[in-house]
């Protein structure tokens, strides 16, 4: 336990040091619709007409993580308690643990352990703490990796055999699988890991032969479950808005979670932020990114990564 505590302390100190190194000169935000650079305030204002803001990230981009916190704060300033945070970083089966932590019933160290927080939880802690301080709900949106792994190895039929309680942790069966351009995008990758505790922005095929692992079925369960989690929340909280934080692969181009959400809640309106770093920063060819989302955030590669 001492070793684990030291790890998170080290991550926190490292992240704080990185954050102190950048300013507004280390990122650019571009509105695709208006074809010009804008501020986060513009996105917050536009959310007046939307239900879900997808904030797609590269998981180790320290600048993006700080901007996510700022975006969450701006949305709260404008929409108050009609706001919730949804996170890829926590699975549906730990929602009770999240609620206990937000309610002040359990200690942080127990929360981190029992909620299976990612190793870089320090990147997401500021948003969780802001939600806790302001009594905002946090949706543990993702499907547990044990089930996405099962789906990839044995197909949806194997998920059907799970207990009723287990099935609560995933999207209703059967779920829609990736198709069209998103299918093609997934299949363009040649490597994928199925054993990692977290997924990545760019999936890689398993070490086993591709014929032995169905990437499409596994990845689609992640996407469908996060979409279903958001849809469930919106159904119960019709006046509220959701800021969903996920790897950019899960929302870029309106694919993945965004597409799946339309199946579960067709009338929900989504706004997409896509982030990236660019070696030519601050000179950016916005045309090369404009298909990824409604707003594009490019961060300075000179700023250190959080891991």
Image (cartoon, rainbow, N blue to C red):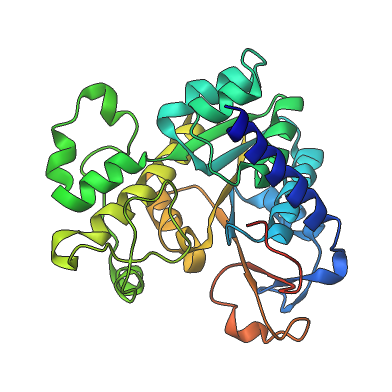
Left or right: 51, with 218 as reference point: right
**Foreground: 226 or 302?**
302
Residue ID at (57%, 57%):
59
Residue 304 horizontal/vertical position (percent): 73, 65
In which quadrant will I find the N terminus?
top right
**Foreground: 128 or 263?**
128
Q: Is residue 48 visible?
A: yes
Residue ID at (71%, 38%):
9
Q: Quadrant of residue 189?
A: bottom left
Residue 74 horizontal/vertical position (percent): 79, 46
**Foreground: 67 or 109?**
109
Question: Please, is residue 108 above or below residue 53 in the view?
Answer: above
Left or right: 66, with 262 as reference point: right
Question: Please, is residue 6 above or below residue 183 in the view?
Answer: above
Q: Is residue 263 visible?
A: no
Residue 113 horizontal/vertical position (percent): 52, 28
Residue ID at (49%, 69%):
253
Question: Please, is residue 123 above or below residue 81 in the view?
Answer: below
Left or right: 9, with 186 as reference point: right
Question: Please, is residue 217 above or below residue 33 in the view?
Answer: above
Which residue ends up furthest to the front in the rendered image?
A: 3
Residue 255 horizontal/vertical position (percent): 42, 63
């Amino acid at each position: 336990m001492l070793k684990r505590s030291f790890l998170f302390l080290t991550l926190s100190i490292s992240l704080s040091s990185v954050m102190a190194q950048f300013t507004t000169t280390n990122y650019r935000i571009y509105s695709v619709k208006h074809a010009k650079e804008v501020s986060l305030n513009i996105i917050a204002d536009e959310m007046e007409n939307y239900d879900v803001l997808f904030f797609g990230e590269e998981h180790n981009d320290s600048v993006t993580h700080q901007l996510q916190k700022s975006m969450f704060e701006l949305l709260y300033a404008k929409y108050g308690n009609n706001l919730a945070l949804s996170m890829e970083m926590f699975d549906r089966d730990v929602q009770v643990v999240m609620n206990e932590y937000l309610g002040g019933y359990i200690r942080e160290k127990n929360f981190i352990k029992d909620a299976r927080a990612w190793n870089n939880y320090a990147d997401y802690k500021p948003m969780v703490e802001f939600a806790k301080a302001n009594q905002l709900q946090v949706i543990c949106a993702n499907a547990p990796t044990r089930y996405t792994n099962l789906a990839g190895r044995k197909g949806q039929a194997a998920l059907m055999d799970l207990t009723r309680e287990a099935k609560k942790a995933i999207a209703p069966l059967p779920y829609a699988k990736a198709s069209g351009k998103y299918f093609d995008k997934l299949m363009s990758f040649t490597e994928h890991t199925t054993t990692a505790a977290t997924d990545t922005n760019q999936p890689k095929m398993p070490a086993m032969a591709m014929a032995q692992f169905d990437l499409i079925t596994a990845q689609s369960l992640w996407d469908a479950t996060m979409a279903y989690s958001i849809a469930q929340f919106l159904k119960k909280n019709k006046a509220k808005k959701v800021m969903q934080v996920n790897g950019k692969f899960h929302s870029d181009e309106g694919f993945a979670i965004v597409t799946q959400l339309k199946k579960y809640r067709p009338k929900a309106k989504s706004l997409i932020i896509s982030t990236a770093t660019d070696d030519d920063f601050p000179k950016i060819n916005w045309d090369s990114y404009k298909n990824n989302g409604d707003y594009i955030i490019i961060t300075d590669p000179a700023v250190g990564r959080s891991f």
